[in-house]
Image (tube, rainbow, N blue to C red):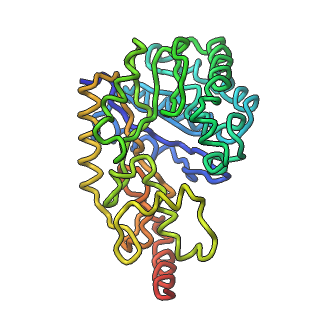
Amino acid sequence: MMNRKGVCYDVGRMMMGSDWRPKFEPRIIRRELEIIKNDLHCNTVRICGLDVKRLIDASEDALRQGLEVWFSPEMWDRTQEETLQYITNAAVEAEKLRLKWPGKIVFSLGSELTLFMQGFVEGDNVFQRMNSPTFWEIVKAGKHNGPLNDFLSRANDSVRRVFHGQVTYFSVPLETVEWGIFDFVGVDFYRDARILDSYGHLVEGYLAQKKPVMIGEFGCCTFQGADKLGGNGFMIVFGMMQDFLQDRKLPPIVSQMIQVAPRIDGHYVRDEDLQARELLDQLSVLGRVGVEGAFVFTFIAPTSLYNENPKFDFDMPSFSLVKSYPEPDTIEEITKQAQDRENSF
């Protein structure tokens, strides 16, 4: 039985200039955190995003409601020095919360930095890095692990000078982290067809560190075949957009991924029951293995809007537990645009 049961709650991650939560309204934040606590029966929440004030405001609301907070500031695609300064500044603010709610806030000094920070692999953003000719060569040889651990050591020292609670890092399985400096082992670990039978065993490997293990992200998208793709499920959005991409070639890694799931008429089939079954099964596996806790990714994805027309249902390739609908005053316009596009095929 896991001690910590939670979800990821995004207050505005920023990728290549795109804000994943364009509107931040305290009233809505409060209501969504209430749902996380009372309807999903969570006792903890991982609050992620770039803007430190948003992180603080959402965390304070969650703490008032009795949730434990895993404070997760994330600045993507910047240099190591820029990232270190940002993390340290965020830790200063997180310490103010910790003093008000001692023992109720854990600080994450980053996640999947090999992919999301400059300096370990060539490329200005995550897609360029993963498609770099040297990416798999570097990863297979483990050349990224030394520089990664050097950065994590510096970041840990800097954070602990200003934040006096527990600290962790959320890794990705291709990283080998020196966990001795952290209070928790953290890993974002999605199950897919390649590791269906070995998922529990692979997670068990992290227990060898003799520290509590937290799964920082796991989940499943909402279409037939999403269980096979696991953490790569969002890639089908590129398949949905192939009609609009026309002659522009997709990166090889994307082209391979979007061929996996079944299609009807060139598009994907919504399956909410599959998402629910997959999450319950993975939670069962993680509970049997004996992890300290896990965060389902993710509660909501406000920029991945649901549409009754599957050709434009961008909630399908998101990991969101709840649907996001267009703003009331734009529903008619969006529907008209969708119909116009369909009629043009």
Q: Quadrant of residue 136?
A: top right
Q: Quadrant of the N terminus?
A: top left
Give the side of residue 220 with respect to residue 281, left or right. Answer: right
Looking at the image, residue 69 lies above or below residue 182: below
Give the side of residue 341 with respect to residue 121, left or right. Answer: left
Give the side of residue 312 with respect to residue 82, left or right. Answer: left
Q: Residue, x 48% and y 33% (percent of image)?
A: 173
Across and down, in percent, residue 28 comes to 45, 47
Q: Quadrant of residue 37?
A: top left
Looking at the image, residue 158 lies above or below residue 86: above
Which one is nearer the viewer's eye here, 111 or 69? 111
Looking at the image, residue 257 lies above or below residue 290: below
Which one is nearer the viewer's eye here, 117 or 320? 117
Across and down, in percent, residue 270 comes to 32, 64
Q: Residue, x 46% and y 52% (percent of image)?
A: 301
**In this figure, what is the number of numbered marks?**
0
Q: Residue, x 57% and y 75% (percent of image)?
A: 244
Across and down, in percent, residue 249 comes to 62, 68
Which one is nearer the viewer's eye here, 320 or 218? 218
Across and down, in percent, residue 73 comes to 59, 32
Q: Residue, x 45% and y 34% (percent of image)?
A: 188
Looking at the image, residue 55 lies above or below residue 167: below
